[in-house]
Amino acid sequence: MSTSTYTRERRIRFSDCDPAGIVFYPQYFVMLNGLVEDWIDQGLGIDYANLVLGRGVGLPTVHLEADFKAVSRLGDAVRLQLAVERLGTRSLTLQLRCVGRERDDDLRMSLRQVIVTTSLESHGAIPIPADLREAIERRP
């Protein structure tokens, strides 16, 4: 497992919330998918849009486990965190978390996600592209 954690700060928006003013749980999946895209694009230096649209590499989720520990409310400042748990030949397992901005132990929710690299042409699994693998391995 990587000891490096990619982190992005985010404010909980009106569009994230249900009528009670708390995050509607599927919105966490949207937020954390955005974190994965930012990690690849900015954290690893691989152009995400080009990886998918130009190179035809799909990154579908094949397994997802989520735990919801505390609510996040409209206006809350949170940190979204990503760490690599496992780097396989055709898949990677990520640990993702949403925590309060002030303390890592203010866990709002956590997610374990398995992503498989696929060909958008055949929709079959393919090896993780060499540049993506190298960028992940370079992170401390």
Image: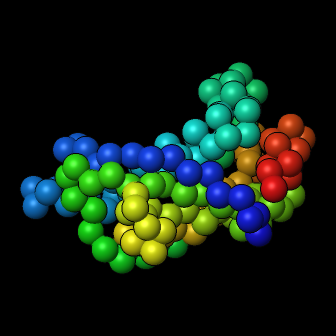
Quadrant of the rendered image containing residue 45: top right
Q: Judge whether 3 appears above or below 16 on screen.
A: below
Residue closest to the eye, 53 or 134: 134
Looking at the image, which residue is at 45% across and 75% down? 105
Looking at the image, which residue is at 10% across and 61% down? 20
Give coordinates of residue 136: x percent, y percent: 80, 49
Q: Let me know if residue 62 appears in the view.
A: no
Give coordinates of residue 132: x percent, y percent: 81, 41
Q: Is residue 86 left or right of residue 33?
A: right
Q: Which residue lies furthest to the left in this view?
A: 19
Q: Is residue 114 left or right of residue 3?
A: left
Looking at the image, which residue is at 65% across and 57% down? 5
| Image quadrant containing the C terminus | bottom right
Looking at the image, which residue is at 39% across and 72% down? 106
Quadrant of the rendered image containing residue 92: bottom right
Q: Let me know if residue 80 appears in the view.
A: yes
Residue closest to the eye, 98 or 68: 98
Q: Is residue 69 left or right of residue 59?
A: left
